[in-house]
Image: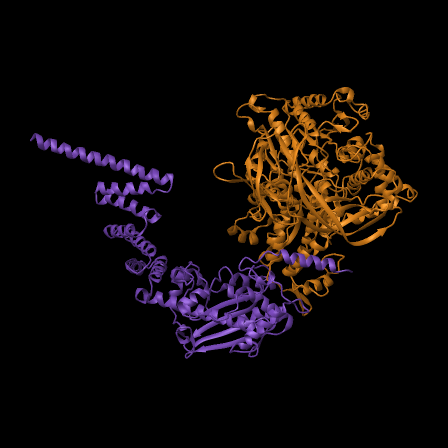
Chain colours: A purple, B orange
Amino acid sequence: MDLSRFRDAARQTRRVVVPPRAVPPARELVYVPVDADGYPLDQVRSWCAESEDDQLASSPLEDARDVSTAYGSCLVVERDYLIDERHGCWSCADLHVEPDDALDVLAGKAITRAQPQRVLYVDLETTGLSGGAGTVPFLVGCAWTDAEGVHLRQFFLPSFSAERALLAAVADLVGEADCLVTFNGRTFDVPVIEVRGAFHRVAVPLCDLPHLDMLPPARQLWRSASVAGDGSCRLMALEEALVGLTREGDVPGWEIPGRYFAFIRHGDARALEAVFHHNRCDLLTLAALTARARFLVRHGLEATASTGERFGLARLYHRAGRLEQAEACYRAAADDSEGKPSIRGAAWRAVALLCRRARRYAEATVAWEQVLALEPEETPSAREAREALAIHHEHRARNLERARAHAEHALAIAASAAQRAGVAHRLARLDKKIARQASSLTGRFWELGET
Amino acid sequence: MSSLGLVRQPGDKDRALEEALDGLVPHEQRPGQALVVAGYGAEAGAAMTAIRRYPAAEARLVPFPAALDDGLRQVLARRGITQAYSHQAEAIDHVLAGRHVVIVTPTASGKTLCYNGPVLDAILHDSSARALYLFPTKALAQDQLAELHALATLIGEATDTEIGVHTYDGDTPQDARRSIRTKAHVVLSNPDMLHSGILPHHPRWAKLFENLRYVVIDELHAYRGVFGSHLANIMRRLHRICRHYGSSPVFICASATIANPRELAERLTEREFVLVDQSGAPRGEKLFVFVNPPVVNAQLGIRRSYLAETRRAALEFLKRHLQTIVFAQSRLATEILTTYLKDAMPGLPGTADAVRGYRGGYLPLRRREIERGLRDGVVRAVVSTNALELGIDIGALDVCVMAGYPGTIASTWQRAGRAGRRSGRSAAVLVASSAPLDQFIVRHPDYFFDSSPEHGLINADNPHILVDHLKCAAFELPFSTEEPFGATTAPTQDVLGVLAEEGFVHQADGQWHWTDESYPADAVSLRSVSSDNFVVVDTTGAAPKVIGETDYTSAFSTLHEKAIYIVEGQLYQVERLDIEGRKAYVRAVDCDYYTDAITYTKVTILDEAEEDTLMPASHSHGDVHVVSRIVGFKKIRFYTSENVGSGELDLPEQPMHTTSYWIRIPGEVVGLLPYSADDRRDGVGGLATATRTVAQLLLMCDRQDLGLSIDSGGPGEGGADAHVFLYDNYPGGIGLSAPLFHMRERLLIETRELIRSCPCEVGCPSCVGPIGELGPRAKQVALALLDRLTGIDTSRSLRDAMPF
């Protein structure tokens, strides 16, 4: 049978493949010479060369150990980062945190019944980012800490047929943990593992562990600190900002599947060293971020280093119902004359809302005035402040003229018809009150005049 | 119109229908006299070439099969269904016995109960049982959901079981998806969603696949050609996944009339089926009428415009308050007819919506509104493309008028079925255009009424389609080194080897694993060559707004610059086509013409699979490369259809690798004909046009399935050979070329017969093509050519020429 038509069909679809949603795969767009298996030669060579230069040298699998399970065996690479080793500006010993309830605060809800003794950090490297039955985690990086430092275990899939074994080996380790910490694991790592379990129809205890996804609290705490300055919260950006580490020659994410496929075809694992290294860095950084976040939660305001951190911490406390600590942090963020006006304005707004809820109206009024001072006139918070101040002056301070002035500003910046109608209604009522007040005053003058 | 307060008695409608039919044509031109068309002068009215009456039929009722759950039967009884139509009972019996069933009965004969019954029964017996329903469109799934949901709720209440029934398609909210995946007993979806959203994520659907008892494929006849070839491969993938989870579902297929429902079901699913095709449902009397517009120029064979004739026919019914659906052959014709009917029926203030257009490309909201209007009776007439041919619920209409022969017998019956669903008299009127196939059908009514409808042809082993789905399948589950892909005749293991060379898969430990970071289903669109859409942006007002959409392939011919784009009668002119951005910017205009694109096609032979030298010409089939390009457009005036201008266009070429059948006529054979070079060229063109008509008839395929390209060769005696290509109009081919090659002798003989028997003098649109485009000797030369081509072979047996 002539296979050329099938070959044409396969090549044609290759050209129209929709790029993965994450990063465009440059490999498909540039022409590269291929080996007998159709794999880009230069790429494989350069990957290997790159890892030869690497101080860790050669294959990451040289020190790998076979782990046997009921389903066969997979490989595991173990590494400990002990007291005297460093990860950026962190000493590895500092990555260990004694049990506390900070994880609940970071998660925004009670995820653990007791203070977790053993936190397991997990990060996957997979054969694709799109999910689905054909996306396989080939490297499951796990890390935990103790007084000695960080212990790292990377479970590696030496061939696709070892996947059940890999899942089983991971399950054994998970059995000893009582809390899972990931970075974006809620949408990626955990679902991927879940699907693999369903695929092989084996239980995956990992998915049943209490889980803290560090991405949302990291966003709260460090969005404004991210080096990119675009509010993105990529792990590497945080690593640069908080761990003081800039990775040299790190393997780009989109290249990772290709390196694994090259290993599968050629059996040469040297190009994977960079991937193992990348995975280890991710895990250490995740541990560092988590340690930092827990430290912040434990020590509160005095531990914070920036306006953004104060504000983020305040919001975490706020969500956890620790209002006193929240207010202190909000006030600190609000008072910080070096901080961005937008953060300070938002902090004052939060203070105002907290005070109002606690019926400390005078303090709330001060805070609203601060919001006005910091926020540009047409922002929603400025409008909210105007409204709040109008209410305060109308009903509590009974300063109708001031109430009227705020209401007029509010009318000018109303964003919707409904808002406009509400403010107009208030203005009409204020005008009536002012008129009544005036007439009762004049009335009184009349009385005075007559007497 | 109901707004006028007219209350009609049931009998009134039947009388109104008779009157309208009387109004269609004068009595003296009823069948009998009708076939003497040659003598018609310019004044002659339309001829009714055939009228058939299909008598009403009584219901055949039988008890429900005893095996059916009691609770289910009680609930059905509470809804007034105490007995089953005979075909329902028969189908349910088969299904309960575990046999795959295909049900072919008319519209509104209660097909849905044939599958809803067994499915609900299974769920009542075992609440873990699951069923998957596939409809060709999202809209049809939504339509079915309402009915099934009502039934499931009643049963749920009566039996105290919770029965989850949900649609799962591109519109399903993300947060609902998780619970549907695990909790829905019945999932209503479409092939596209199964292909890209369900199968590749099968582990998430483990509960469904582990417990999958039934797979329902409704509107089976929709899965022909490319779409069917895709579905067959999706079913191969489904089987693999079911096997992985240990289930083996029973397939229930339902179809409108086609010639080979069982064969099609078996090809699509690669399972053995039993056929249930004797309907026990009642039906009202139905009249089927063929109308041929009068000849206005006998010499040129020009008939009165069939659109004008359709307008006249539709108005006969509309003015008698009969709710009417008009089917047009193209989006353009739909808009033209909508304009005509709106002009003729301006309606009282507040009744302006009595006439509506309907076609793909309208936004969903507008479509739902029109469907509702039809059910409520507010909309009195709808002009539609084939978009309303499938089972969207638009209620029971009184009359169906078809502007032009829909191209296939099955399609014609399906459209006719939209009128008159259960009782009372209804009518279907076919107005023939001057297209050859139309003329053949109206002049040979027995051919239409007595022959079987078309075969659903698919080619599940089209290399492009197969490779696409093989990749998806490998992504979903590794292939073992022994495993074939369904019942494909392609060497699965070798093709996997090709995929490995390209880096998509890798073989290790006896399995082929997916080794590519892409998600292969994303790159495959089931509906057309490319999944791209163009949106049409109206820039008339201050804020631009999207008023429609068009698929990539037809965008160039309908949205080129200066094209007139029509939505429900409103004319827009395209000001700019942004090919990169997939947008066409239009502005509302008022003009009296529409545009028609001119396409130029060139075919190159790549590989000849078989050749037969039936001297003096040779016939072949094989692989070809087709390049088509829109080179210009014509402006055509409404009503008179005169050509009032044209323009040139420079649009990118659209290349395609497909299969073709072709005739090669040696240069010397053409050159020896005693005619001028121009006449010879016209003769080849005329022969080609007629051949295509006959090929379409013999293959029983849709008109757009078969492309035609002519290379009329060089001038003079020693000129280059002439070629006539009839190619599969889809990349990779859909299996028409080889059958056409195998019926080549019959093709030539029937083509000769078509031209010879045409009553025109020098060629007309019904045989070799219109005079004007072809010279006055086209018919003569084409016949002379065909005499030579068929002359020596008439003695050969024709019996084995039919491939079916």
The answer to whether residue B94 is seen in the rendering is no
Q: Which residue shows up at 64% across the image and 57% down it?
A: A15
Q: Position of residue A165 (x, y in %)?
A: 59, 70
The answer to whether residue A143 is seen in the rendering is yes
Please, which residue is most extreme toward the left here?
A451
Which corner quadrant of the image does residue B495 belong to?
bottom right
For residue B711, side relative to residue B655 (left or right): right
Q: Position of residue A199 (x, y in %)?
A: 60, 62
Q: Position of residue A20 (x, y in %)?
A: 56, 58
Q: Nearer the viewer, residue B323 or B660?
A: B660
Which corner quadrant of the image does residue A255 belong to?
bottom right
For residue B100, side relative to residue A163 (left or right): right
Where's the N terminus of chain A, which quadrant? bottom right
For residue A216, side relative to residue B781 (left or right): left
Up/down of B295 relative to B577, above or below = above
Up/down of B355 relative to B410, above or below = above
Q: Nearer the viewer, residue B319 or B83?
A: B319
Q: Nearer the viewer, residue A399 or A374?
A: A374
Up/down of B251 relative to A213, above or below = above
Which corner quadrant of the image does residue A36 belong to?
bottom right
